Image (cartoon, grey):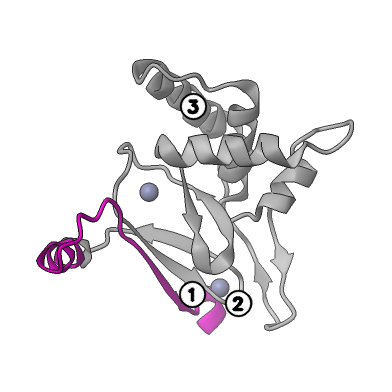
Amino acid sequence: MAMAHHAACDHDHDHHGVAGAALAAELAAAESRCAAADQRLTPPRRRVLELLLQAGQPVKAYDLISTFAVDGPPAKPPTIYRALDFLEKQGFAHRIESLNAYVACRKEADGHAAAFLICDCCGATREIEPKASAEIIAAGAAAGYALTGVTIEAHGLCGDCRG
Ligand SMILES: [Zn+2]
Ligand SMILES: [Zn+2]
Ligand SMILES: [Zn+2]
């Protein structure tokens, strides 16, 4: 999605998704990662990953449902949710709870702790290294919890929207 305009501010929002050769390369890399893990990037999984990469920002499941099919009827919701579930488990996407949306992950590790900087004006979301996650996991261990994941979601305004 490019140049979406938001009523809350008077500037345009330009989200930088992945396109063209870069997109083809990301999808090819995803296919080899799946093959190496004995998983299959089926056409629906591949298509959902493509949409997330193209968006370059968090996308809600119902937007994926309506944009999934290039022509013809929209996708069936379970197809999309199963594909999202797969992409999340394989480390290609994260679910952002506070937005009820999904975002592509372009790191090469699955199951990593993640932190997100989220712009409440334009929705621009950046994944950063979650510095505090080791402390949270240690605090969890002290409290008797074996934590398997930490996701931090920080809200505010991005540099463009502060402008
Ligand atoms: Zn990630
Ligand atoms: Zn913004
Ligand atoms: Zn803005």
Q: Residues within 10 Å of mark 3 (few under 14, many from 20)?
A: few
- Residue 95 in the image, given as x and y percentages of width and height: 50, 54
Q: Which residue is mark 3?
A: 25
Residue at 48% x, 31% y is 26
Give whichever of 142, 161 is nearer the camera.
142
- Sequence-wise first label, 1 or 2: 2
Of badges 2 and 3, nearer the viewer stands 2
Instruction: Answer whether labels 1 and 2 touch (C-beta < 8 Å).
Output: yes
The disc at residue 22 is: none
Residue 149 among those drawn in magenta: yes
Give whichever of 42, 71 is nearer the camera.
42
Residue 78 among those drawn in magenta: no
- Sequence-wise first label, 3 or 1: 3
Q: Does the rendering let one see residue 132?
A: yes
Label 1 and label 2: CA atoms lie apart by 8 Å
Q: Which stretch appears magenta?
A: 135-163
Q: Which residue is mark 1?
A: 158
Residue at 33% x, 38% y is 110
Residue at 66% x, 51% y is 61
Q: Does the rendering let one see residue 19?
A: no
- Residue 49 in the image, given as x and y percentages of width and height: 57, 36
Residue type for callout 3: Ala
Q: Which residue is mark 2?
A: 121
In the rendered view, does 132 fall on the left or right side of 110? Answer: left
Instruction: Answer whether labels 3 and 1 touch (C-beta < 8 Å).
Output: no
For numbered disc 2, what is the local secondary structure?
Answer: loop
In the rendered view, does 4 fall on the left or right side of 105? Answer: right
Asked if the beta carbon under badge 2 is closer than 8 A to the nearest atom of ligand 3, the reply is yes
